């Protein structure tokens, strides 16, 4: 049955055989784009959908049931020298050309998306409307999407690319998807067994973000974890394999009356997802691990400072966002007040506030 669509330039989704979705950004950005694959597949089940992402973010989309191929751009290509990088780029382009895409969905302002639309010549292409980019950008796409609404969650902003071409995602098609896989699940099971936590309730705390101005002070995080321990909740802490994040976890451990379990720097992204999936609750700041928790269905307590929780808050799971109501300047998006790397709207949040949020969410989801 034909359904009326008021969008005059909506594309006939039944005529799409292959589509490429491009998301060249960080881990969390890639993860919140996963509903695009699910919604496109739901409305055009015949389509083979590929993803193009940076190699270090590929684990966010590998094993996704609606993705046929995950093509990768390795940021390390630039270390191969001019000819080495050229060869890698030419191989990628040849691989993409061979797929003969009918549709390209470009979800960021990255210039590569515009160039690929010119080189791959899909029948349809949708990308962000960027009036300051000139004719080359505008001519790269058949459809331009309106962007940058700070009150709109990035999941919906990504899905707006599909709405622009006439696809209206249903509510049940807007979920995040991240599949840890059997190997990651087995590895985490062994870690938890070593802690004596296999099959037991625990809270996963990931204190850090790649952007440290989003992080809560060490003493506050230690106070929170101490209270969770006193309430009888085992806590497992994680961090990325970086000196700064390891130093933060060491500083937190040093302030605890009883050191907590730690898997700092030892987990892959898939294993991090498997750990979070096994947890009773996730506590962290605005970060990729927070989005991972939402994607695997774990309730989330998220601390927000200068970044916007309306755009980047936990999506699709029971959650509590803890943010200051006394700073009308937030969310400012700045790297700390005045660029000083420390945000008053974060440092003034108390352990009592976050503990109360965790306690309420645990009671709600028990």
Image (cartoon, grey):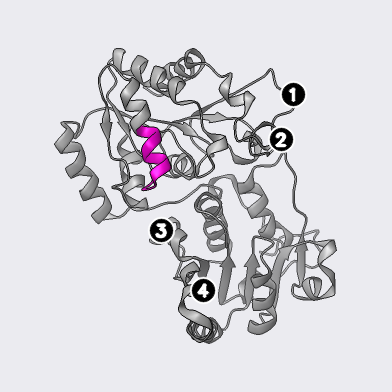
Q: Quadrant of residue 106?
A: bottom right
The disc placed on residue 78 is: 4
Q: CA distance from mark 1 to mark 3?
A: 37 Å
The disc placed on residue 328 is: 1
Q: CA distance from mark 3 to mark 2?
A: 30 Å
In the rendered structure, which disc, 3 or 2, sits on the residue that comes first in sequence? 3
* Circles 4, 1 touching at the beta carbon (< 8 Å): no
Of 353 and 97, the residue lying toward us? 353
**Residue 222 in magenta?**
no
Provide the secondary structure element on which disc 3 rests: helix
The disc placed on residue 224 is: none
In the rendered structure, which disc, 2 or 4, sits on the residue that comes first in sequence? 4
In the rendered structure, which disc, 3 or 4, sits on the residue that comes first in sequence? 3
Residue 212 seen by the camera: yes
Q: Quadrant of residue 55?
A: bottom left
Q: Name the residue at 44% across, 56% down.
A: 60
Q: Which residue is mark 2?
A: 332
Residue span colored magenta: 240-249
Residue 145 position within the rendered picture, expressed as x and y whole percent measured from the top left = 75, 59
Tell us which disc is closer to us: 1 or 3: 1
Residue 83 position within the rendered picture, expressed as x and y whole percent measured from the top left = 51, 87
Provide the secondary structure element on which disc 1 rests: loop
């Amino acid at each position: 049955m034909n359904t009326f669509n008021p969008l005059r330039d909506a594309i006939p989704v039944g005529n799409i055989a292959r589509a490429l979705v491009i998301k060249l950004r960080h881990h969390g950005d890639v993860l919140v784009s996963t509903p695009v694959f699910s919604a496109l597949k739901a409305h055009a089940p015949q389509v083979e959908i590929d993803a193009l992402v940076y190699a270090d973010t590929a684990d966010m989309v590998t094993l996704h049931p609606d993705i046929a191929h995950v093509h990768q751009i390795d940021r390390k290509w630039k270390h191969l020298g001019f000819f080495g990088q050229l060869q890698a780029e030419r191989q990628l382009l040849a691989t993409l050309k061979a797929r003969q895409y009918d549709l390209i969905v470009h979800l960021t302002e990255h210039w590569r998306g515009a160039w690929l639309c010119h080189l791959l010549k899909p029948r349809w292409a949708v990308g962000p409307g960027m009036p300051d980019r000139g004719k080359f950008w505008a001519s790269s796409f058949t459809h331009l999407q309106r962007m940058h609404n700070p009150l709109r969650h990035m999941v919906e902003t990504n899905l707006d690319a599909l709405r622009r071409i006439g696809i209206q995602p249903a509510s049940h098609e807007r979920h995040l998807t991240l599949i840890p896989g059997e190997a990651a699940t087995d590895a985490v099971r062994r870690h938890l067994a070593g802690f004596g936590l296999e099959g037991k309730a625990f809270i996963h705390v990931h204190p850090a973000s790649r952007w440290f101005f989003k992080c809560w002070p060490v003493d506050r995080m230690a106070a929170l974890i101490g209270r969770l321990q006193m309430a009888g909740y085992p806590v497992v802490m994680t961090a990325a394999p970086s000196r700064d994040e390891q130093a933060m976890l060491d500083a937190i451990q040093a302030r605890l009356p009883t050191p907590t379990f730690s898997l700092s720097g030892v987990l892959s992204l898939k294993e991090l997802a498997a750990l979070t999936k096994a947890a009773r609750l996730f506590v962290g700041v605005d970060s990729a691990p927070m989005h991972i928790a939402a994607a695997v269905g774990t309730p989330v307590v998220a601390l927000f400072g200068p970044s916007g929780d309306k755009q980047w808050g936990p999506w699709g799971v029971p959650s509590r966002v803890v943010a200051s109501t006394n700073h009308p300047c937030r969310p400012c998006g700045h790297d700390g007040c005045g660029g000083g790397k420390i945000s008053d709207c974060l440092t003034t949040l108390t352990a009592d506030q976050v503990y109360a949020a965790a306690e309420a969410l645990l009671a709600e989801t028990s």
